[in-house]
Amino acid sequence: MFSKVFAISAFLALANAGLIPVHQAASYATTNLISSGIHGIGAPVLAQSYAVPSVGHSVDYYTHPKYEFNYGVQDGHTGDNKSQQEVRDGDVVKGSYSVAEPDGTLRTVHYTADDHNGFNAIVTRTGHAVHAAPAVHAAPIIAAVPYASHGLYH
């Protein structure tokens, strides 16, 4: 079984590298997976994970990416306070996120990314840092344990 999985993985790696034409790889991989008795989860996962399109089915790899999302958490019990929002239109991404720091300040990061300027971020901190004095703990008491020689080393 291991040799079959290894052979299929090697074949798909060669097809993905462009050493074997894609249409030939798709038909060969799916026919051999089905004819060799590998059914169920194995065949579709391998074909999908390497993005080998089936013969006669076209896949649009150039769809314009566009999305927008935001979320936030404010939990008074645990003190978890954070939020994020992001907008993407093509190759331009803009967003921000904020996180409550342990010292009581709020860190906010505004970022942009595009193919011309790369990734840029502006980090700001709001609020006043409150540093508590470290807790003083007593040193542990270590008692000496008497050594019982039993006369072995005399």
Image: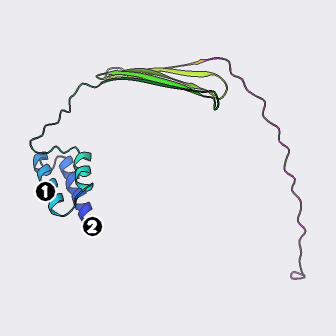
Percent position of residue 44, x then y: 23, 50
Location of mark 1 (residue):
31
Q: Quick check: can you spot residue 112?
A: no
Side of 6 relative to 100 (left or right): left
Q: Quadrant of residue 11?
A: bottom left
Specify whether residue 141 is painted magenta.
yes
Side of 130 relative to 79 (left or right): right
Q: Residue at x 63, y 32 (%)?
A: 78
Percent position of residue 8, x then y: 22, 58
Which image quarter is the C terminus in?
bottom right
Look at the numbered disc 1 and give the secondary structure of its residue. helix
Depth check, front residue: 108 or 122: 108
Which image quarter is the N terminus in?
bottom left
Look at the numbered disc 2 and give the secondary structure of its residue. loop
Q: Residue at x 26, y 46 (%)?
A: 49
N-terminal of the two: label 2 or label 1?
2
Percent position of residue 68, x then y: 37, 22
Percent position of residue 143, x then y: 89, 59
Amino acid type, mark 1: Thr
The answer to whether residue 77 is above or below residue 153 is above
Location of mark 2 (residue):
1
**How many neighbours does mark 1 have within 10 angstroms: few (below 14), some (14-19), or many (20 or more)?**
few
Q: Quick check: can you spot residue 123?
A: yes
Amino acid type, mark 2: Met
Contact between marks 2 and 1 (CB within 8 A): the answer is no
* Highlighted magenta segment, given as a residue range: 126-154
The answer to whether residue 35 is above or below residue 123 is below
